[in-house]
Structures are given as structure tokens and as C-alpha cells.
Amino acid sequence: MALNAARAARPRYERQLPEQRRQELIDATIECLKRHGHEGLSMRTIAAQAGVSLGLINHHFPNKDELIAAAYRHFNTELVAGLQAAVQRAPAAPRARMRAFFKASFSRPNLDPEALAVWVVFWGMYRHSPLIQGVHRESYQGYVQLLRDMLGELVREAPRQGPPVDLRLAAIGLTALLDGLWLEWCLEPASFRPAEAIALCEAWVDNLVRRTDGSALE
């Protein structure tokens, strides 16, 4: 009898903290985009994935753009955080840190064809959503800055033999190479192996460093 009374006294559901609920909605949104692409933008689909009502979503996010922008920010933050963690685990030598970055870029969870569906939705919204534009600028700057810092370490230890390197442009160029290889692999994984993508990126960096005088234009 006492056990039954204790069960009856328990709430039918556990009230969650707002941040925890928001994160669950963001996770559900990303999962819907992975499974359904643009069809996953439906608030009803997201609500069903999260197991909540539409009203609860509206309580935490005033509109769909707010929810998608939050999902975009989280997706980008997780990406950069994973790359930063890989770099931090690597030996202190600049080349080892750069190689760790490349290996993390071309391995799971970053190298995932399902993730392409998520990115396509975000990119498709970019032109018409100021919220998505703001998140993109914020995340892109963080990603480029990470590459810029690592390239600066490599350049500063290089022998002096050529013109100084413009680190801003170098980081933008390397970002474009990484993004292009990632997209090509997601579209056609059989076209090249991840190890070949890593070798291409390392060759690009080696060529840059060989042409520098060991200084950089910050």
C-alpha cells in the first residue's frame, strides 16, 4: 500500500529547466533536418520529434526562424568546439596541431553525409533570414580565426625566404579548400578517401609556408 501511495504521489512528468527544454527542441530540430531536409522545417514535425506540443515550442521560441537560428548556432558551435578539442589534445608543435585539425575535419561526426541535409537547409535560408545571416557571420569568424591562429604559428617558425603571408586571406583560402573537399565527399564519398583530403590540405599549407619569410600580415 505504501509503495502504491508513493507512486501515486509522483508527478506524471518531470518539469524541466527552460534551458534544458530549449536544448531538447534544438536537438529535435537538427534531427528532423537530418531525416527530412527542408520538410523537417515543419513545426509539427519538430514537435512530434521532441514529443511536445506546438504551444510549448512557441513558449520557448517566438517563431520558426528563432528556433532554426538557434539550431544553426548550436550546430556550428559543436563543430568548432570539436575541432578546438582535437587541436588541444594534439602535441604542442604547430604542424601536429594543424594535422589534428585536418583529421578531425575529415572524420566523424564532421564527415557525415546526413549532416549535409542540415547545412543545405541553413544555406537555403541564408538570403532571406537576418537571424541566420547573423549566426553565420559569428560562426564563420570563429572558424576562420582558429585557422588564422594555427597558420600564424606555422608561419612564424618558417625560415625566411619569401614575402610575408597575409594570414586573413590565407585562412579564408584554407577554409574554402576545406569546405569544398567536405562538400564533395558528402555528395560523392567514393570520389576520394578522407586521408587524401588531409594530404591535400597539408600540401596546401606546406606550399604556403615554403613561400613565406617567416613573418605575417596580421
Image: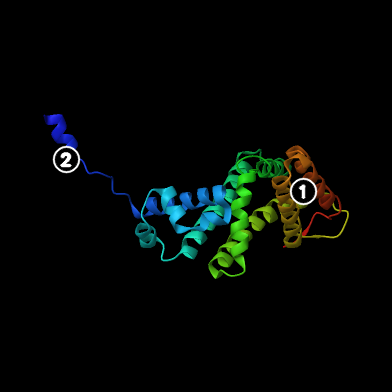
**Residue placed at 56% from the left, 48% from the top?**
34
Residue 136 percent across, percent down from the top left: 60, 62
From this viewpoint, is residue 153 visible?
no
Task: Give the residue pinned by disc 2.
Answer: 9
Q: Distance between the residues labelled 1 and 2?
A: 67 Å
Residue 70 percent across, percent down from the top left: 49, 59
Q: Which of marks 1 and 2 is nearer the N terminus?
A: 2
Front residue of this view, candidates 69 and 83: 69
- Figure quadrant of residue 126: bottom right
136 left or right of 177 in image: left
Outermost residue to the right:
161
Q: Under tag 1, what secondary structure?
A: loop
Above or below: residue 146 compared with residue 189: below
Q: Which amino acid type is shown beneath numbered disc 1? A: Glu
**Residue placed at 68% from the left, 54% from the top?**
149
Task: Give the residue pinned by disc 1.
Answer: 157
Q: Which amino acid type is shown beneath numbered disc 2? A: Ala
Image depth: mark 1 or mark 2 in front = 2
Front residue of this view, candidates 198 and 182: 182
Q: Under tag 2, what secondary structure?
A: helix
Outermost residue to the left:
1
**Residue placed at 86% from the left, 54% from the top?**
211
The quarter of the image holding the C terminus is: bottom right
Residue 116 percent across, percent down from the top left: 63, 50
Front residue of this view, candidates 161 and 49: 49
Residue 87 percent across, percent down from the top left: 63, 43
Kindly identify which numbered label has been placed on residue 143.
Answer: none
